[in-house]
Image: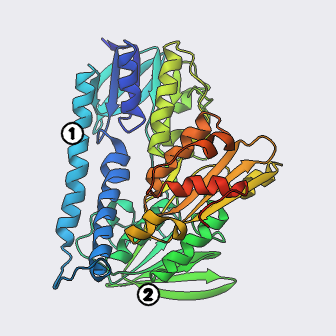
Amino acid sequence: MAETFDLIIVGGGPGGYVAAIRAAQLKLKVAVVEQKHLGGICLNWGCIPTKALLRSAEIKHLLDHLPDYGFSAENVQVDLKKIVARSRGVANKLAGGIGHLLKKNKVTVYNGFGKLMGGGNLAVSLNDKPVAQLHAPHIILATGARPRQIPGLEVDGTQIISYFEAMVPESLPKSLLIMGSGAIGIEFASFYNDLGVEVIVVEMLDRILPAEDEEISALARKSFEKQGIKILTSATVKKAEKSRDSVKVTVEIAGRAQVFEVEKVISAVGIVGNVEDLGLENTKVKVERTHIVVDGFGRTGEPGVYAIGDVAGPPWLAHKASHEGVVCVEAIAGKNPHAFETGNIPGCTYARPQVASVGLTEQKAKEAGREVRVGRFPFIGNGKAIAMGEPEGLIKTIFDAKTGALLGAHMIGAEVTEMIQGFVIARQLETTEAELMATVFPHPTVSEAMHESVLDAYGQVIHF
């Protein structure tokens, strides 16, 4: 006999477990099916452990610049094993907390792989052995995604590696080539460079961090190159020849081939959705480019089947998955939530310097036919940033010239991943420049640069 629930969620990542808890709050009987790790890739192998690694790299950078702050020290050593162990410890602690939260909310958890069997039925198995038969009128697929493999440049786990292996190095390579300059590639470039590794970044497009505003991308490139990272744009990796201790990577730039010999290669060229073996072939669920097609409430073409998170397409962000899960569950429970849309989803890159943004870039705003007013304020004009020893950065704001609506905000510099939420709230509340200009920002804070950027868009900047 199948165990019956109101809702079954396949996948216990940031989309799945949040959806489960919200559903439990709405008095639904909920089951979560998770094959590997509660918390998903984000908590176990992505968002959280990488930030722990980057924190260690940030401290290493500060230690290298102790005289700037009035200190001196000798024989400061990098203990890579302890850096990695701390990262794994942080992830494991939080993963355990997810299990506690689900238990507290009376969510039933099944360890296994879920497959749709039709009619609201789900078969759960582990290592090809049956675990359970479940039934629910609503099933949410939150199966996430995995690193994309490039033919001829496949990850082997030793010399050509993915973010999984890049997070748990046993030793530091002397040199490293990273394919891809999105958030994942740039964060690893920053981490390894700060620990003294010679880093090369290869990007097919004409600029790094291609999802960001073009001006911010240019500033990021300038900063990373100043730190010693070699960046190749409009470049394509053609082949990788592995020997015992190195990899010879052929990169084509402007029709000419260049060969770079490095110890390791990190592949960070995107992800593909986990849609295989879910039983989708006998449903009306539509899959495009490995991702499940959904509407603003997570509904697929198959009644009673939903999808959220990375498997449901971009932006591939944990906080997008969580919010998407809440919207989906509230719709199932008849709460009439607003349809999910991505315009107010912030994006963050936790490199040094950090990059954060929300809304339209200047180019996208103009392509949409908007007449814009653009404000800018550099960190060099901010007292707190100078006092912190972090004078490198910029806040850029984009407004609709006719309505004053905040179309987009783009930042680079220290702690901007913490500050972007101010502009996210402003967009969510449909705030205009008038409210932002009338808002009092505390002094001295780096956030004052946000205010000054808005003022600059309207010719009222004070400190620059």
Instruction: Give the camera-side residue of 111 and 220.
Output: 220
Query: What type is the residue that disc 2 sits on?
Result: Glu
In this view, the residue in front, 403 or 297, is: 403
Percent coordinates x, y for residue 31 in the rendering: 33, 22
- The image quarter containing residue 131 is top left
**Which residue is disc 2 drawn over?**
261
Mark closer to the chain start, 1 or 2: 1
The residue drawn where x is 63% and y is 39% is 435
Q: In the visual, does 33 lie left or right of 456?
A: left
Position of the N terminus, as image quadrant, is top left
**Residue under label 1:** 96
Disc 1 crowd rating (10 Å Cα; few below 14, some 14-19, many 20+) is few
- Give the class, few, some or many, for how many residues have Cα within 10 Å of label 2's Cα (few <14, many ≥20): some
Residue drawn at x 54%, y 38% is 425
In the image, residue 258 sits, relative to residue 321, either above or below, namely: below
Quadrant of residue 54 in the image? bottom left
Q: How many marks?
A: 2
What amino acid is found at the position of numbered circle 1 in the picture? Gly
63 and 24: which is toward the camera:
63
The location of residue 116, given as percent across then percent down, is 45, 26
The x and y percentages for residue 376 are 64, 62
Which residue is painted at 58% across and 26% down in the image? 297
Quadrant in the picture for residue 16: top left
